[in-house]
Image: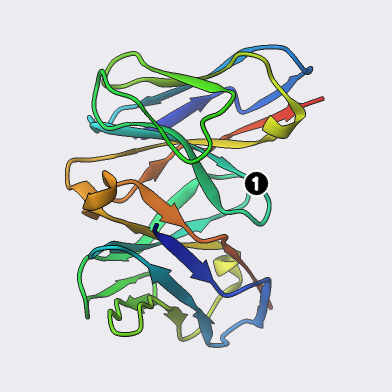
């Protein structure tokens, strides 16, 4: 019963380095999301994908790109990491009930950029 | 745009105390409302939800009622346990916003034995 799986769990980057955060879900969900969580700021949406083949910007997309590789997988890429991107990143997915569908979250990737 | 405001924390209670965490929202339409819980080192998980006015969501002794007239969705539990210590997030989702969720800032609850 895997649900939403994120890798890696922890990562340290130097300013300017790039990396890709991986996310996969096994619940046959159409929609997938990337959020970042910062102290005292709740969760902020970076990008989302309402269905396979589509992606859209969220609240804080600058400095990130995404790829919806297939229905299961949704990756987040940092092309040139900055200290401001130090955060905990959560991938989530939701089913086909629209706004009534709750989000299912992975356990997060804790990223530190020095 | 949509917004969610939660009572500021942290909240510290003794075991078996009554819990209320306030949540109010602003939305353009008729949102669905959710409470999520986050335990240390984990992702958020759904605690309960309500999809229309006057609905009551409940789970694990927690309850929240969708109050359209006061735009509120306060979380309550009659008797908290140490194991309830976590961060609680109120959230809303609207079809008019492509089903995307808007979250409050979270309230940290610590329950002491």
Whether residue A20 sits left or right of residue B61 in the image: it is right
Residue A96 x, y percent position in the rendering: 17, 41
Identify whether B42 is placed above or below B106: above
Residue A101 in view here: no
Q: Nearer the viewer, residue B33 or B56?
A: B33
Please name whichever residue, B43 or B93, is drawn nearer the observer in this view of the structure. Answer: B93
Could you tell me which chain the residue with mark 1 belongs to?
A: A
The image quarter in which residue A114 lies: top right
> Which residue corresponds to mark 1?
A38
Q: From this view, report whether residue A10 is shown above or below residue B2.
A: above
SS state under label 1:
loop
Classed neighbour count for the residue bearing mark 1: other residues with Cα under 10 Å, few (<14), some (14–19), many (≥20):
some
Residue at position x 23%, y 65% in the image: B30
Residue B35 position in % (x across, y down): 41, 63
Q: Residue at x 26, y 18 (%)?
A: A53
Q: Is residue A5 left or right of residue B96?
A: right
Q: Nearer the viewer, residue B65 or A44?
A: A44
**Residue lying at the far left of the rendered structure:** A97
Note whether A17 is above or below A23 in the view shown: above
Scheme of colours in the image: rainbow
Q: Residue at x 24, y 27 (%)?
A: A51
The outermost residue toward the right is A114
Q: Nearer the viewer, residue B32 or B64?
A: B32
């Amino acid at each position: 019963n895997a649900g939403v799986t994120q890798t890696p769990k922890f990562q340290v980057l130097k300013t300017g380095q790039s990396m890709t955060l991986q996310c996969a879900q096994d619940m046959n969900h159409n929609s997938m999301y990337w959020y970042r969580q910062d102290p005292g700021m709740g969760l902020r949406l970076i990008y989302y994908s309402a269905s396979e083949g589509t992606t859209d910007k969220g609240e804080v997309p600058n400095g990130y790109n995404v790829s919806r590789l297939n229905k299961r997988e949704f990756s987040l890429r940092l092309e040139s990491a900055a200290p401001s991107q130090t955060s905990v990143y959560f991938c989530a997915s939701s089913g086909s009930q629209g706004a009534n569908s709750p989000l299912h979250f992975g356990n997060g990737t804790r990223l530190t950029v020095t | 745009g949509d917004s969610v405001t939660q009572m500021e924390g942290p909240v510290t209670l003794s075991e078996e105390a009554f819990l209320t965490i306030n949540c109010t929202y602003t939305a353009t339409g008729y949102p669905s409302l959710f409470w999520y819980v986050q335990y240390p080192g984990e992702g958020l998980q759904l605690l309960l939800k309500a999809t229309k006015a006057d609905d009551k969501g409940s789970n694990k002794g927690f309850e929240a009622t969708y109050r359209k007239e006061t735009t509120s969705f306060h979380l309550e539990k009659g008797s908290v346990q140490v194991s309830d210590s976590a961060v609680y997030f109120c959230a809303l989702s609207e079809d008019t916003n492509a089903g995307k969720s808007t979250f409050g800032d979270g309230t940290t609850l610590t329950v002491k034995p």
